[in-house]
Image (cartoon, helix red, strand yellow):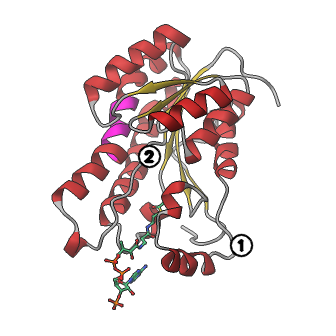
Amino acid sequence: MTKETSKVAVVTGGTRGIGAAICEGLKDAGYAVAATYQGNDEAAKKFSANTGIATYKFDVGDFDACEEAVKKITKDLGPVDVLVNNAGITRDAFLHKTTPKHWHDVVHTNLDSVFNMSRLVIEGMRERGFGRIINISSINGQAGQAGQTNYSAAKAGILGFTKALAQESASKGITVNAIAPGYIDTDMVRAVPPEVLEKIVAKIPVKRLGKAEEIAAMVVFLASDKAGFATGATFAINGGQYFS
Ligand code: CAA
């Protein structure tokens, strides 16, 4: 694979799960990578020791914190060419048991973050005439999922954001795409009660959970120069579980 050595990539929620695989895929492709995280210092330390990838701790839902972090990343690595909005959390419950805090936490981390980080890099990308924004949505933003009104709404919101920003950015050398992973073998999916998860996996035509690397491979392609004609699209990678 051609190395894209001079480019800088930021991956939110980059120290675990899908985000960690994305960071490693981009690093292998030659990018200087910054991985952001919010809470799990131990996982971040381990990730950094294993990969040599720099980590930045802040709340992606907080605009001011994002602004400070983007400034620091730019100072450390250079202007951001590739932004992967991957950070996400779940607070699953049926709506009749969902609290305002469950709602706000999920929208804050999963959707406000996409505005915050994209807003902070878009002007530089427009000035330089190049950029790649890749938003990690979910099958549950496309199909909905019982127990996830908050998560499904935030992930669906990402799809609208992606299409609108793609239109704004197409003439500036910036592509904006979404990936909608299905059920991938990560801590987040492993937190689903086993009996519920078993039923979900039984309905996946390929009969297994996806691998984080299978999402990372698409991110590496979308970040590359070769993907310049792909924009505003949603790439579903879900083992055939849902055809949009
Ligand atoms: N569709 C419809 N009904 C469902 C359902 C579903 N998928 N899952 C459960 N139910 C029903 C149950 O059968 C049960 O009905 P009865 O009372 O009539 O028997 C009722 O809903 C309550 O179910 P639980 O006993 O499980 O209720 P609970 O309050 O203990 O838990 C829950 C509810 C937290 C939503 C739990 O069912 C759950 O965790 N479900 C999984 C949700 C899910 O898929 N989350 C994805 C996380 S991974 C992720 O989000 C990554 C990604 O992007 C793909």
Residue hosting label 1:
206
**Residue flagged by tag 2: what amino acid is it?**
Lys
Residue placed most toward the observer, 157 or 197: 197
Horizontal side, residue 201 vs residue 188: left or right: right
Residue 17: image location, x then y, percent: 57, 47
> Is ligand 1 closer than 8 angstroms to the Cβ of mark 1?
no
- Say what secondary structure mark 1 lies in: loop
Residue hosting label 2:
163
Q: Are marks 1 and 2 in contact (CB under 8 Å)?
A: no
Packing grade of label 1 (10 A; few <14, some 14-19, many >=20) is few
Residue located farthest toward the front when viewing the structure as drawn: 42
Chief SS of the magenta region: helix
Which circle, 1 or 2, is nearer the viewer? Answer: 1
**What residue is rendered at 55% in x and 43% in y?**
16
Which quadrant of the figure contains the N terminus? top right
104 falls in the magenta region = no
Does residue 187 sit above or below 36 in this rendering? below
N-term-proximal mark, 1 vs 2: 2
Does residue 12 sit above or below 211 in this rendering? above
Which quadrant of the figure contains the C terminus? bottom right
- Say what secondary structure mark 2 lies in: helix
| Quadrant of res 33 | top right
> Which image quarter has ligand 1?
bottom left
The magenta segment: 111-117
